[in-house]
Amino acid sequence: MAQFQGNTGDTFKRNTNFTRSQRPRTIDKQEQKKIYVGWANTYLAQREFPELINDLQKDINKGLILINLMESIVGERIPHVCRNPYYQNQKLANVINCLKYLNKKGIAIHYGIATDIVNGDLKAILSLFFSLTQLEHQIKLQKSKQKAINDNDEQRMASNSYNSLSLRRGKCWNNQHSQLRLNLCRSIRHRLNVPTLILGIFLALD
């Protein structure tokens, strides 16, 4: 047991003696690798000519699968890509281009890990894929906000259309009602020979 002091000055005890089964579970790198491969392949499978990841440390070192994944997440083409990289500097340029794109989207990541990614360093690759999940979350949040704005605009337009239609119907009814009263008064005047002045007073009472 360990004692702690709260904001109110009271002391309380917290159990810090966890058994092995009670301790918070940590995910090792190999398990993270499997999770990220499955996550990435759900996006890559949606492409017209899908190229899936089998080995995370080997398959993204050219930068092409990485670019395909990012394009699937953001829904737009990434410019300045070498589509047939053969030399090491071409592969490196593709990966650096991806990192620059992430920074442009507000996801901070250091360009220095580009060489490690090309060389298959798992720690650097896992760091990159964590940044990609941040990008995914950001894109989904932006889409959600835009959808809410569009829904509000549609509701406002529908409300304005309804109010405008109601106003036109109201004016139409008033015009029809006035015309009916006028026709009725004319009919009464002709039948009963009522002076026009009295009929005018009757119409003004409406």
Image (tube, rainbow, N blue to C red):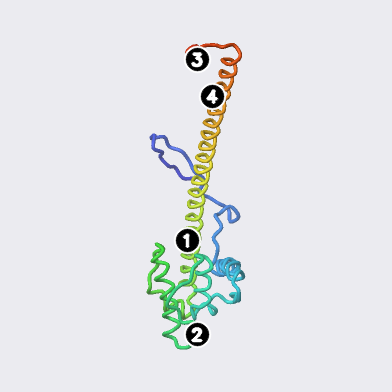
Nearest to N terminus: mark 4 or mark 3: 4
Labelled pair 2, 3 in contact (Cβ < 8 Å): no
Nearest to N terminus: mark 3 or mark 1: 1
> How many angstroms separate mark 1 from mark 2 (CA)?
28 Å
- Say which residue label 4 marks: 178
- Say which residue label 3 marks: 196
State left or right for residue 175 relative to residue 87.
right
Where disc 3 sits, the SS reads helix
- Say which residue label 1 marks: 134
Position of 96 relative to 177 (above/below): below
Nearest to N terminus: mark 4 or mark 1: 1
Position of 18 relative to 190 (above/below): below
Q: Nearer the viewer, residue 103 or 153?
A: 153
Furthest toward the bottom, the residue is 87
> How many angstroms separate mark 3 from mark 1 (CA)?
82 Å
Nearest to N terminus: mark 2 or mark 4: 2
Identify which amino acid the numbered label 1 is placed on: Gln
